[in-house]
Image (cartoon, helix red, strand yellow):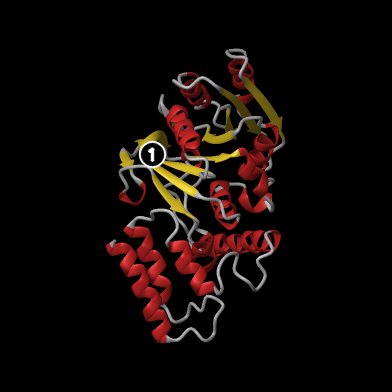
């Protein structure tokens, strides 16, 4: 299985050699590395030229600045692997990252999208295990979780990978000017809306650098920024909502509420995640496109999810 690793870079030339070396040091060797430089103005170009000469599996794309989504689009378009893995130029893979994700994709043909745990380093040091999980977990589908609660499953860029055939359902990402940063959020959203089956390998297999100049991590979110983020998420959701022709009918199931319960039962969702599903039926303002969802019906649905949590 060939894995395409995509490094997106903008003015992080001083971090790039470490990121590339973390790929060169992988115990799994069937990979290609595509470095997409998004109009850097530092010394990234000369560094990329030198790095490309180290290994024939490394190639580079130099483009005008368009933002992270534009870099993702260029990388995916040129990737030839069966699986596509993403790596920010200021992050690192641990030596077994590609080996362990390849094992999951080989053993679980139903897996469309996989993300791992991470280890923060630099100014912060912490191991992050998503949803406090300790082993590979089939999270099932999460389409309704996005539509009803605006929650998308995933981790930062460098923890995520996707099967190429699934990637081609959602790429190129639209509205690239909306996603000059945080395009990993767009990827998570789009993948959920495409009904991709997501898995999580919670072991911290990549190193997420906190260096004080991150474009998102640790940055104070003003109310204006939060509002803008919500608007661009809604615009992206509307685009894929139309692309996959959901219309007034849920993707699977008789009603939207039934579909929500059916989705909660897919895979082996951890209890922390199931409580987020239950939260929909705690809030009478969330109608799930059904104006006649009675309090009794909400109680019934909530109890079904409680039963899943207990189980």
Position of 132 with respect to 183 (left or right) is left
The residue sitting at 33% across, 39% down in the picture is: 124
* Residue 82 sits in quarter: top right
The residue sitting at 52% across, 50% down in the picture is: 197
Observer able to see residue 47:
yes
Observer able to see residue 119:
no
Q: x and y percent of residue 220 in the render?
A: 44, 54
Q: Residue furthest left?
A: 310
**In front here: 204 or 244?**
244
Position of 69 with respect to 131 (left or right) is right
Q: Is residue 32 above or below residue 151?
A: above
Q: x and y percent of residue 215 in the render?
A: 51, 44
The residue sitting at 45% across, 32% down in the picture is: 103
In the rendered view of the protein, which quadrant contains the C terminus?
Answer: bottom left
In the rendered view of the protein, which quadrant contains the N terminus?
Answer: top right
Residue at numbered disc 1: 118
Q: x and y percent of residue 15 in the render?
A: 49, 27
């Amino acid at each position: 299985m060939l894995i395409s690793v995509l490094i997106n870079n903008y003015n992080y030339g001083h971090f790039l050699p470490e990121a590339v070396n973390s790929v060169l040091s992988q115990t799994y060797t069937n990979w290609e590395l595509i470095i997409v430089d998004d109009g850097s103005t530092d010394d990234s170009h000369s560094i990329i030229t030198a790095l490309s000469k180290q290994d024939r599996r490394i190639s580079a794309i130099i483009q005008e600045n368009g933002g992270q989504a534009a870099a993702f689009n260029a990388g995916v378009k040129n990737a030839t692997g069966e699986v596509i893995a993403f790596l920010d130029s200021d992050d690192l893979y641990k030596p077994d990252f590609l080996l362990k994700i390849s094992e999951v994709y080989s053993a679980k043909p139903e897996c469309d999208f996989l993300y791992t745990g991470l280890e923060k380093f630099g100014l912060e040091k912490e191991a992050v295990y998503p949803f406090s999980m300790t082993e590979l977990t089939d999270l099932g589908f999460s389409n309704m979780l996005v539509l009803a609660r605006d929650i998308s499953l995933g981790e930062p860029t460098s923890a995520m990978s996707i099967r190429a055939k699934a990637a081609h359902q959602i790429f190129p990402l639209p509205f690239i000017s909306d996603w000059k940063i945080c395009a990993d959020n767009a990827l998570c959203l789009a993948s959920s809306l495409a009904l991709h089956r997501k898995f999580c390998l919670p072991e911290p297999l990549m190193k997420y650098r906190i260096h004080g100049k991150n474009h998102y991590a640790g940055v104070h979110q003003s109310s204006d920024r939060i509002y803008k983020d919500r608007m661009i998420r809604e615009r992206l959701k509307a685009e894929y909502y139309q692309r996959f022709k959901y219309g007034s009918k849920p993707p699977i199931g008789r009603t939207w509420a039934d579909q929500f319960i059916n989705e909660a039962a897919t895979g082996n969702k951890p209890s922390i995640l199931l409580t987020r599903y239950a939260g929909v039926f705690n809030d009478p303002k969330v109608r799930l496109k059904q104006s006649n969802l009675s309090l009794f019906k909400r109680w019934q649905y909530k109890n079904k999810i409680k039963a899943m949590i207990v189980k």
